[in-house]
C-alpha cells in the first residue's frame, strides 16, 4: 500500500471524530481531573496515548492500532479494547475523553456530546517542534503533562546527540518506494532525513510531495534510496516499480528500509527514526565516485 494511500486509510479510520467540539490549541491547560476512560480513534493518537497513561485509563484504541504498535512498542496494547470509531463504540465504552485526528463527522459529535465525552483533536506534525507540540497537547489532554515533558526531553536529547556527532558521509537520499508519493519540503519525513544528517533530493522549494518515475530517479540519482516498510505486506504496483531491475542494479547495497509510523505520526519515536536512518546510512559502502 502506498504511503499516501495508507495515510488516507488512517485518516478515514479517524473520520468519526467531530470537528465542532475538538480543541486545536498546541498547549492547552491540563485538565483539573485526569480522565479515566480515554478513547482513541486514530493510529497516531493510539501510539501517543499508550505512552502517556496506564492501560487502566484507556477505554479503547482504534482497530488499526495493533500492527503499528507491534512495530514501535510491542505489547503496549495488550489487553486494551479496540473501537471502529462507531457511535455504538462510544455508547458501549462510555469514554470521558475522546482523542483523534482533526477529521470528524457531525454524527459522532452528537453522540459524544450526549454521552458527556470531551473531544480533543490533533493536527499533523511537519517537524520536530510540531512533534513536541503534539506530545504536550496530548499530555495536557490526558492529565499527564509531566510524562509528556519527559518524552519531549528524551526526544530532544537524541536529536542533540545526532547534531553533535554528525554523519560519516553526507548522503543524498529520497524516500522513493516506487515513486508515486515522495515526501518533500515541510514534511516530517524530510525533518527526519535532515536530522539524520542527509539531504532529501525531493525537498524542492514549495513542494511537500512529488512523484519520481524510474526515469526521473535515474536522471537525478541520490546516493541511497529509502524504502518504507509495509506492515500489511500487501502487493501493489508501486512495490513492483520499486523493484524495477534497473533500480535494483543501480542501488544494489545502497538501500535502507524504515518504519513508516514515525514518519506519518508525530511521535517521540520520530527521533529514533532519525537515529536509525543515520546508523543505516553510516553502514552503507562508500559512494561510487
Image (cartoon, grey):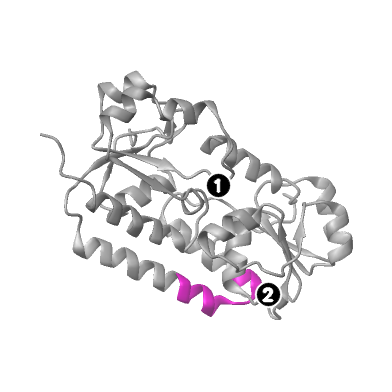
| Residue 253 image point, x, y percent | 27, 40
Q: What is the magenta range? A: 139-151
- Relative to 263, is 10 on the left or the right? right
Location of the N terminus by quadrant is top right
Instruction: Answer few, some or many: residues within 10 Å of disc 1's Cα (few below 14, many 20 plus, some between 14 and 19).
Output: some
Name the residue furthest top: 215
Q: Is residue 1 above or below residue 142?
A: above
Q: Secondary structure at mark 1?
A: loop
Magenta: main secondary structure equals helix
Q: Which residue does the image show at 24% across and 52% down from the upper left?
A: 283
Is any part of residue 31 visible from this angle?
Answer: yes
Classify 253 as above or below 272: above
Q: Which residue is mark 1?
A: 231
Q: Quadrant of the C terminus?
A: top left
Could you say which quadrant of the image residue 168 lies in?
Answer: bottom left
Quarter location, residue 25: bottom right
* Front position in the image: 128 or 89: 89
Residue 25, can we see it? no
Tell me which residue sits at (56%, 32%) in the image. Answer: 235
Q: Provide the residue designation for mark 2.
A: 55
CB-based contact (under 8 Å), mark 2 and mark 1: no
Q: Residue at x 67, y 68 (%)?
A: 78
Front in this rendered view, residue 84 or 233: 233
Amino acid at each position: 500500500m502506498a504511503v499516501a494511500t495508507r495515510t488516507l486509510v488512517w485518516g478515514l479510520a479517524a473520520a468519526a471524530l467531530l470537528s465542532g467540539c475538538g480543541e486545536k490549541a498546541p498547549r492547552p491547560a491540563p485538565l483539573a481531573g485526569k480522565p479515566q476512560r480515554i478513547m482513541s480513534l486514530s493510529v497516531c493518537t493510539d501510539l501517543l496515548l499508550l505512552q502517556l497513561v496506564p492501560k487502566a485509563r484507556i477505554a479503547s484504541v482504534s482497530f488499526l492500532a495493533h500492527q503499528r504498535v507491534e512495530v514501535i512498542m510491542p505489547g503496549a496494547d495488550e489487553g486494551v479494547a479496540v473501537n471502529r470509531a462507531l457511535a455504538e463504540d462510544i455508547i458501549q465504552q462510555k469514554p470521558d475523553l475522546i482523542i483523534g485526528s482533526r477529521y470528524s463527522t457531525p454524527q459522532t459529535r452528537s453522540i459524544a456530546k450526549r454521552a458527556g465525552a470531551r473531544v480533543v483533536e490533533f493536527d499533523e506534525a511537519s517537524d520536530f517542534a510540531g512533534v513536541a507540540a503534539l506530545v504536550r497537547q496530548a499530555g495536557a489532554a490526558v492529565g499527564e503533562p509531566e510524562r509528556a515533558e519527559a518524552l519531549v526531553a528524551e526526544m530532544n536529547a537524541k536529536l542533540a546527540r545526532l547534531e553533535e556527532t554528525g554523519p560519516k558521509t553526507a548522503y543524498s537520499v529520497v524516500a522513493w518506494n516506487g515513486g508515486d508519493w515522495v515526501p518533500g519540503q515541510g514534511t516530517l519525513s524530510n525533518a527526519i532525513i535532515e536530522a539524520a544528517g542527509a539531504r532529501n533530493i525531493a525537498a524542492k522549494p514549495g513542494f511537500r510531495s512529488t512523484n519520481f518515475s524510474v526515469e526521473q530517479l535515474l536522471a537525478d540519482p541520490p546516493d541511497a534510496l529509502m524504502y518504507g516498510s509495509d506492515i500489511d505486506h500487501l502487493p501493489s504496483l508501486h512495490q513492483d516499480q520499486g523493484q524495477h531491475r534497473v533500480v535494483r542494479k543501480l542501488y544494489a547495497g545502497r538501500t535502507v528500509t524504515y518504519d513508516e509510523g514515525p514518519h506519518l505520526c508525530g511521535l517521540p519515536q520520530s527521533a529514533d527514526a532519525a537515529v536509525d536512518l543515520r546508523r543505516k546510512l553510516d553502514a552503507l559502502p562508500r559512494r561510487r565516485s
